[in-house]
Amino acid sequence: MDKYVLKYFNLIRTIIAILIGIFICILIIFIISKDPQDGLRYFLLGPFTSVSRLGNVIEMASPIILCGLAIAIPFQAEQFNVGAEGALFISAAVATGFGVSTAFPKIIHIPLILLVAGGVGAIWGFIPGILKAKWNTNELVVTLMMNYVALFLSLYIINFHFRDKKANFLVSYQLPKTAWFDQFIENTRIHYGVLLTVVLVILVYILLYKTKLGYEIRMTGLNINFAKYGGINTFKIIVLSQVIGGFIAGIAGISEVMGIHRRFNWQATPGYGWDGVTVAIIGRNHPILIAFASIFIAYIRVSGQVLNLLTDVPSEIVTIFESIIILLITAEAFLSQWKYKITVREAEKREVKVESAS
Amino acid sequence: MTPILFASIGVAITTLSGAVNISLEGTMLISAFFGVIVSAFTKSLILGLIAGILAGVALSSILSYFHLKLKADIILAAIALNLFASGLTVFLLYIFAKDKGTSSSLRSLVFPSIDIPILKDIPIVGEIFSGHNILTYFALLSVLIFYILIFKTPLGLRIRAVGQNPDAASSVGINVNKIKFYALILSGFFGALGGLYLSMGYVSWFARDMTAGRGFIAIAASNLGANLPLGVFLASILFGTLNTIAIYLSSLQIPSEFIQMIPYVATIITLAIYSIQASRKKRKS
C-alpha cells in the first residue's frame, strides 16, 4: 500500500486538505446553525436540489476553468502572472464593443469576437511577459497593477462609448443575436461557450504535455538555467507562456458575456481570475485536474447560495472553506513527515528484498 | 492617504526583507472588522484598537507560519488569506449584526480628530495641517518610525541584509526565518492600523470588502516609492491626491477613469525603469 501512497501522494494530500476543510465547515455549521442537519445537507448536496442549480455549477465552472488554464500556463513556466482577472475584463469590454458595433452572419461574427477578445488578452499578457523577459521586472506586481488599469480602462470604454443609456445601470448595449452563444439545455443557462471550454481544456493539455513548446514551457519552469543550457529560448518561452495565458483569459470573459449576460454588465472585476489562481493551485497546473477543481469550486459556491437561501448559515462559509483548502495545499511541508516516513519504510523494504535475493 | 500610507509601510518592510506581502488587503479588512465589533460590544476604544491590531498581527502570523514553517509559497498563501479575511468578516458580520452589508446597526466607536493648538488658528495652513484624525498623525509619525527602524536599529539592518542576500546573512549568523517573521509581524501591525482607520476614522462602520483594493494599491505605492520611507510617503500622497481629483472630476462628467488609472500606470513604468537600471548595472559589472 505504501507504494500507492507514494505514487498518488499529491492526490491524497489534496483530498485530505479538502476533508479537513469540510470537517471545519461542518463544525462551524453545528456551532452557529439552529438547524444544523439542514445546513449540513445543503452544504454537501445543495446543487442537487434542482436542475437549474446543477446547471449553475456547470455555467460557473466554465469561466473558472478557462482562467485556471490561463493562470496555469505561465505558472508552469514559473511566471507568477496573476493578470487573468484584468485580461478577462478588458478583453470582454473591447470585444463587446466590437460585437455591438459590427454586423456579420453568426458563423463569422462569433469567431471574430472571440479572436478580438483573445487578441486583447494576448496583448495584456505580452506586456508583463516582455518586461520580465527583457529586464526581469517583477511580473506579479506588474500584473496586479494591470488588473486595475484594465478595470478603469474597461469602465471608460463601456461608460463613454457603448453605454446603453436606456438602462439604469452602467451596462453596454446588448450584443446582436449573431453574437450569442445559444443556451441548449432547458431550465439551465448552459451555453455553447461551455463546449468551447471543454475543447480548450483538451487543447491546453495537448499543448503542455504533447508538444515541443509545452515541454519547453515546463522545462523553463523546472529550472530556467538548465533550460537555457539545454538550448531552449527561455526569452521566447517567458513571453509566450504569458501571451497564451492572456489569450485564454480573454476568451473566458467574453464567453460568459456571449452566453449568459449578452451585454457587458460588470461594474467591478468578477473575481474569476482569482478563482483561476485557486484552481490552478488545487489542480497543480494540470489542465484536466483544473477542470475537476473548477467544477468542485463551482459546486461549493452553488452550495453556498443554497445555504444562504434556505438556511441560517451565511454563504461565506464557502469562502472560508476555499481559503483553508488553498492554504493546506500550498503548504509544501503539510504531511511531508508522513511522506518521509513512508519513503524510508519503502526503501528499507527494498533493501531487505535486495539483500535476501543476493 | 492614511490607510494607504500605513499599508504601504507594511508592504515596504516585507519587501525589504525579500518577500512581497500581498496579504495586506486581508490584514486591513480583518482589523477594520474586529476594531468595530470589539469597540461596539465593549464600548472601549482602546480595546477596539488592541483587538484590531491583534487581528491583523494574527493574520500575519498565520501567513508566516504557513510560509516559513510549512514552506507554502508566500504569494499563494497570501491570496488564500485575503480570501479568508473577506469570507470570515462577512460571515461574522452576519452572525453579530444580522446584516451582510454593513455594521451600521452596531454602535461602534471612532478615533477622535485632533486640533493642533496655535496652528489651527492660522488660515489655510491650519485647515491643511490641523483637525485630522489621530491615526492620520500617527501615520505621519510612522514614516519616521519606519525610517528609524530600518536605518538606525540592528533589526532594520538585519531585515535589509536578509532581503539583499539571505545566504550571506545566514552565513554571518543571522536567523533568516526569524527576521522574516519579525518583518511580517511588523507589516501586519501597520496594515492593522490602516484597516482601523478605514472603519473607525474615515467612517464609523464596517462594510463588506471595504478595503476595496487598498492593500494592492499599497503594493503599488511602496514599489513606486522604492520601499524607502520618504518615497513611500510621497507615493501615498500622490495616490491620495489623484483619488481626490478623480472624485472631483467624476462629478464634472469628465472621464475620471484615466485619473484613477495614473497611479497604476505610474507604478508599472517606475518598476520597468528600476529594473532596466538594475539590469544595466548588472551588465556593466
Image (cartoon, coloured by chain):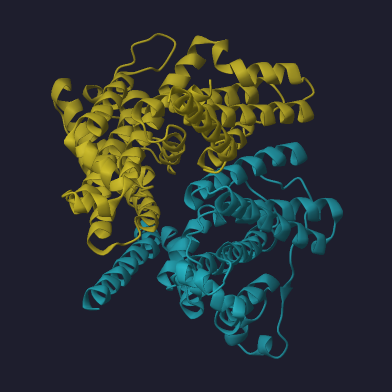
Chain colours: A yellow, B cyan
Q: Nearer the viewer, residue A253 or A279?
A: A279
Determine if residue A215 is in view: yes
**Residue appearing at x 74%, y 16% in the figure:** A37
**Residue appearing at x 78%, y 30% in the figure:** A31
Determine if residue B241 is in view: no
**Quadrant of the rendered image containing residue A20:** top right
**Quadrant of the rendered image containing residue B96:** top right
Image location of residue B70, percent across then percent down: 57, 47
- Residue B167 in the image: above or below residue B25: below
Q: Nearer the viewer, residue B80 or A58?
A: B80
Image location of residue B129, percent across then percent down: 61, 82
Image location of residue A307, percent across then percent down: 64, 23
Q: Is residue B52 left or right of residue B266?
A: right
Q: Residue furthest front?
A: A358
Q: Is residue A350 left or right of residue B285?
A: right
Image location of residue A285, percent across then percent down: 38, 35
Q: Is residue A356 left or right of residue B113?
A: left
- Residue A216 in the image: above or below residue B169: above
